[in-house]
Image (cartoon, rainbow, N blue to C red):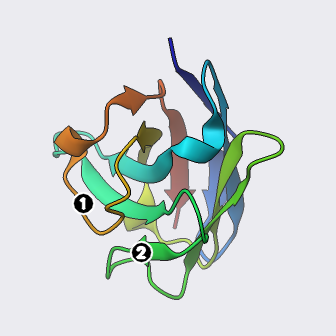
Amino acid sequence: QVQLVESGGGLVQAVGSLRLSCAVSGRTFSTLTMGWFRQAPGKEREFVGAISRSDGSTYYSDSVIGRFAISRDNAKSTVYLQMNSLKPEDTAIYYCAGKRTAIVINTQPSTYSHWGQGTQVTVSS
């Protein structure tokens, strides 16, 4: 009965910034490894990054290193995706996801068992 709700998406110009939030309910948030994925029209869902359930270590796709940052607040059961220096190719629906395993570097969507409904991010040129 885990529920995830994303928020913070919108329209932003290139080189701008957005911060996405994902609120989790239904189980102890601190037991979940949390990931962010995105899906552009006509393309497959792709991994963006993930954060561990314990020490806060992170792992990112090469395409976002240095621009995006994931953080979590276990007291608020919320994970964040800070997006800076946005590019038009970042335009997609962004999803947060959770899994019980502690393998943060596994980037396959199929390894995540809990998913939010997504939030649209559009970056204009």
Residue at 47 percent of width and 51 percent of height: 33
Q: Residue furthest right?
A: 75
Would you name the residue on which mark 2 appears?
59
Task: Where is residue 71? Give x, y as percent.
Answer: 66, 64
How far apart are the two marked residues, 1 and 2, measured between alpha carbons? 9 Å
| Residue 29: quadrant of the picture | top right
Name which residue type carries label 1.
Answer: Thr
SS class, disc 1: loop
Would you name the residue on which mark 1 appears?
107
Task: Where is residue 74? Give x, y as percent.
Answer: 74, 48
Q: Nearer the viewer, residue 71 or 45?
A: 71
* Number of numbered callouts drawn: 2
Q: Are marks 1 and 2 in contact (CB under 8 Å)?
A: yes
Name which residue type carries label 2.
Answer: Tyr
| Residue 70: quadrant of the picture | bottom right
Mark 2, residues whose alpha carbon is within 10 Å: few (<14), some, or many (≥20)? some
| Residue 10: quadrant of the picture | top right
Mark 1, residues whose alpha carbon is within 10 Å: few (<14), some, or many (≥20)? many
Instruction: From the viewer's perspective, tell me whether residue 71 is left or right of residue 61.
Output: right
Instruction: From the viewer's perspective, tell me whether residue 69 is left or right of residue 48.
Output: right
